[in-house]
Image: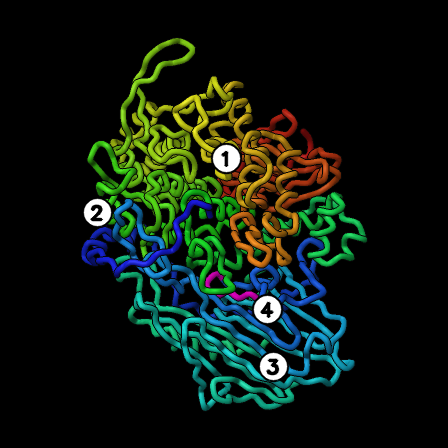
Amino acid sequence: MNDQHPQPQSRPEADRLSRRRLFSLAAAVGSATALGSLPAFAASAPPVRPASSPMRAPGRTTEMWYRVPADAGAMIEQALPVGNGRLGALVGNDPGHELLHLTDATLWTGGINDQLDADGQFPYGREDFGSFTLLGNVSVELPDHELSAVSGYRRSLDLAQGVVSSRYTRSGVVYERTVFASRPDDVVVAHFTQRGGGHYTGSIALDGTHGESTSADAHRAEIFLADSFANGLRYGAVVLAYSRSGKVSTDGGRITFTRCADLTVVISGGTDYAPDAATGYRDPAVDPLVLARTKARDATAATVTELLHTHVADHRALFGRMSVELGSSTPRQRALDTWERLQARTAEGDPDPELEAMYLQFGRYLMISGSREGLPVALQGLWLDGNDPDWMGDYHTDINIQMNYWMAGRAGLSSCFDALTDYCLAQLPSWSELTRAHFNDPANRFRNSSGRVAGWTVAFSTNIYGGLGWWWHPAGNAWLCNSLWEHYEFTQDRAHVARIFPMLKGACEFWEARLLTTTVTDAATGERREVLIADGDWSPEHGPQDTKGNTYVQEVVRDLFLHFEEACALLGRDARYGATVAAMRKRLYLPEVSPTTGWLQEWMSPDNLGETTHRHLSPLIGLFPGDRIRPGAVSDELLDGATALLRARGMESFGWANAWRAMCWARLKNADNAYQLVVNNLRPSVSSSNGSSMNLFDIYQVEEDRGIFQIDANFGTPTAMLEMLLYSRPGHIELLPALPDAWAGSGSVTGIGARGGFLVDLSWRAGRVREARIHSVGGRTTEVSFAGRTRKVGLRPGGSVTLRTF
């Protein structure tokens, strides 16, 4: 996620942490009780089949479509994604060569990676730290269906239903295929049909990408592979095919089919990963191949229509929680396919509101597809086109994993946030032990001057085995905790606070041991006072690595302390330590405006010690995602200093950095700048620039033929768009705080989340609110404002009120 990361390296196998020690740590934080039940990565409940069809026609803002298939050599930029939160696939849709890159979110190399090197870093390579990697490639060969032999080709992704489809005509016959990843049945399904008396003849292959061999079941049309990594993780994958006509059988390690009027391909896979430090992140009772074959075979007990309807009903239950209309596009724009629209939007500069709404909905689609009761969304989400994703496809703790989940509560997808909570709680025993054992290692440049260490923290990179990579990131614990707390602000779920309480307390204990006392002089009064500042640290990826009292750290630790105090009061727990934390919070140094630059200081220095246009906005974290710095809440001097720093950072950067800038401009109610940054991310990605690829993945094109996919922009940009439509904090909702002219004519959004425990349905015309319906999901009182006028609202949980005048 940054250009300063070390290159992957290898090292001898590290000594493993004591399993007894990890088990005791897990018990200490209550892994079986306080943390709640861990997600089931292996078993799944029998699917509930809908009584009626949930299928709907595609909408103008919920269908992406194309006139050509994906190039097999550019799948990450052109293929369409499907996923059920665990299994994912990139779908190429070539008529004669259907290709699916298959992934399982738990398929990781590496391990706990529990030793620092001589430079004080955790090793960061594919063998030690580990990497997300492909499960396999599934291909369906149709030799007489080459692209040159067909006409009327069209492929699409229906965001509202979670279905990839393609259609073409050959010799007067219309051929159609449908691909989806079902969460209820835990399989990927590809279904081939035709209209007009045609048939399919060809073969299916399952190719491993780690040197595995593919085997076949002699009694049914089924092929499979199974193996294990050097870290002991076992995995397996299976492909099963059947037809109501023609012949389907195995031939060596392939499935062959002849003269089939229809063909159904069912794919599953899995590993023996378990999110439990005490068992070494393995479930010894699971045989991944047996489980995958069982799920695939169970799916064949239902008809394809039942599988499809079950999947669509499950998907729509989440996707349908929000609708977005930002205005009407022109008939000419609607006639263009999605890639043509992206190009026209940039070349002509005309707003395309339906395309922009589609981009927002695509982000929601990716969240539903990638974050469902399993592992959270990492750098590339659930989708790969090879075994060497940049930065290992890992979980970065200095912006990326947090940005991935800023959208969830705002976009009607709070349940998708649970994967992040589960991940943090599952890793906490390992993170705690690594902190105890290694944070004060003499090689660690960030070690505590006090010589004491307590609680837990993380490195810049984390993996699914409790392992850390690259440098320590001391403030990463506070930022993760603040993200977990914000989920409570949207949901008002006290049980969630009880689950994360051990994390909040452990992070506070870490900072109690780390903060230093120093004396500062008030520039206005000359008064000297003692304050608490963070020990030597790095403003993430920027400037010197040994400065004290960095603005980023001071802000996130302040919020951590405040949230712990609120948690103690809410749960009626640990009042004495809550008072200790409150006392520390009141003594924390808070950043000032530099008399030299006029900017909010990034370091406790009037000088700029880094790059003016650096991609990270770490010193502005109090503006977003925090909101201590906001119009009307701080002095004009501080607000002007934050604005000046944001302006200096510029309007051109990586997609995720553009998204963060857009959120900050939205908080400052600058609609023009916020909208321009959204538009910047909608530009087609070309050589050496950032933008959207054909499939709308955010791509940084480092070379002409190599782009890097970073999914956080696909989540961050929709977050910025929602912030432009609604700002909230507990007790306050502001409607249309940064509505751009391009959307001002008329529009609506339903189901937008507001902190304090509310959902809002909002419509507007000519830039003015027409109607706002406030629905409580746990909140009781809030004020609702628009254009300087405010209404107070009181509701019982589950109640709603409609406001029509301001």
> For the residues carrying marks 4 and 3, which lies nearer the camera in this image?
4
Q: Which residues are magenta?
A: 85-92
Q: Position of residue 777 (x, y in %)?
A: 51, 44
Instruction: Give the CA distance from mark 4 to mark 3.
Output: 22 Å
Is the residue under label 4 in contact with that under label 1 (CB below 8 Å)? Answer: no
Residue drawn at the location 62% of the way across and 71% of the way down: 178
Magenta span: chief secondary structure: strand
Instruction: Give the CA distance from mark 3 to mark 2.
Output: 56 Å
- Compared across the picture, whether 187 is left or right of 485 comes to right
Q: Residues within 10 Å of mark 3 (few under 14, many from 20)?
A: many
The verdict on residue 362 being magenta is no
Decide which of tag 3 and tag 2 comes sooner along the chain: 3
| Residue lying furthest top | 525
Decide which of tag 2 and tag 4 comes sooner along the chain: 4
Q: Quadrant of residue 80?
A: bottom right
Compared with 799, 161 (above or below) is below
Q: Which mark is residue 437?
A: 2
